[in-house]
Image (cartoon, rainbow, N blue to C red):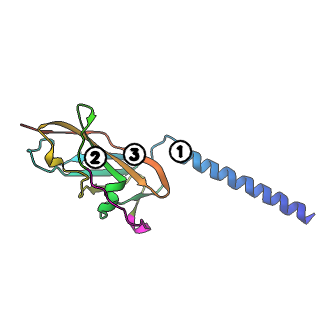
Amino acid sequence: MAYIYRTSLFLFLSCFFMIQLSMGNARMNSEIPRINLSLKINKSMLRYGEEPRFTIKIKNVSSEILLVLNIKNRPDLQDNYSKLVITSFGRPVKMSETVSDPGPISMNDYVAIAPGKSFEIILGSLTFQISKLKPGKYSAHIEYLIDPINMPNEKYRSADVVFTIPQ
């Protein structure tokens, strides 16, 4: 009798945990965004040869505290887990990119963002030299992988910012 009770309890708990795991995966893979990612530029009109300053703003739009990769102090993570994309007339601009070998990621490389709160990062190490762009009108957006360890497929994209380099 005790054997049947233990077996039934084991089966019940196993099913319960499997349902909880599947519900968690469905929520993580859903289309509901957990953050709002935006990109700002310090100037919309740049002189030829001038480097702009880009700022990423990450806002937690979920109801949970989120741990987000903090690339603020780690240029090696910045180069690998955030990508600044520059386009001209809708086509990506081909530019040289920096290749970094990211060191290990620890819990010190994350920042906790409370629901409704934001965190800003000024991009210090750009993956290519914008100062070498020819005169023209350009758009830029950022692609950001918020947690490469626990959620390697959860990448976000900001809206475009526009800047011009006059002749």
Q: Can residue 63 be seen in the rendering of this structure?
A: no
Read off the residue under disc 3.
156
Read off the residue under disc 2.
39
First in sequence: mark 1 vs mark 3: 1
Assign the magenta stretch its main secondary structure. Answer: loop
Q: Secondary structure at mark 3?
A: strand
Identify the residue at horizontal 30%, vertical 64% (top origin).
Answer: 73
Q: CA distance from mark 3 to mark 2?
A: 12 Å
The residues colored magenta run 97-109
Image quadrant holding the N terminus, namely bottom right
Q: Secondary structure at mark 1?
A: loop
Q: 10 Å neighbourhood of mark 3: few (<14), some, or many (≥20)?
A: some
To which quarter of the image does residue 99 belong?
Answer: bottom left
Number of numbered discs on residues: 3
- Residue 159 in picture, x, y percent from top left: 31, 39
Q: Hey, which residue is sitting farthest top in the picture? A: 89
- Residue 17 in picture, x, y percent from top left: 69, 55
Amino acid at the residue labelled 2: Leu
Q: CA distance from mark 1 to mark 3?
A: 13 Å
Q: CA distance from mark 2 to mark 1?
A: 24 Å
Amino acid at the residue labelled 3: Tyr
- Residue 45's place in the image compared with 121, above or below, is above
Read off the residue under disc 1.
29
- In this orientation, which residue lies closer to the viewer: 111 or 63? 111
Amino acid at the residue labelled 1: Asn
Label disc, if present, on residue 116 of the rendered structure: none
- Residue 4 in picture, x, y percent from top left: 89, 60
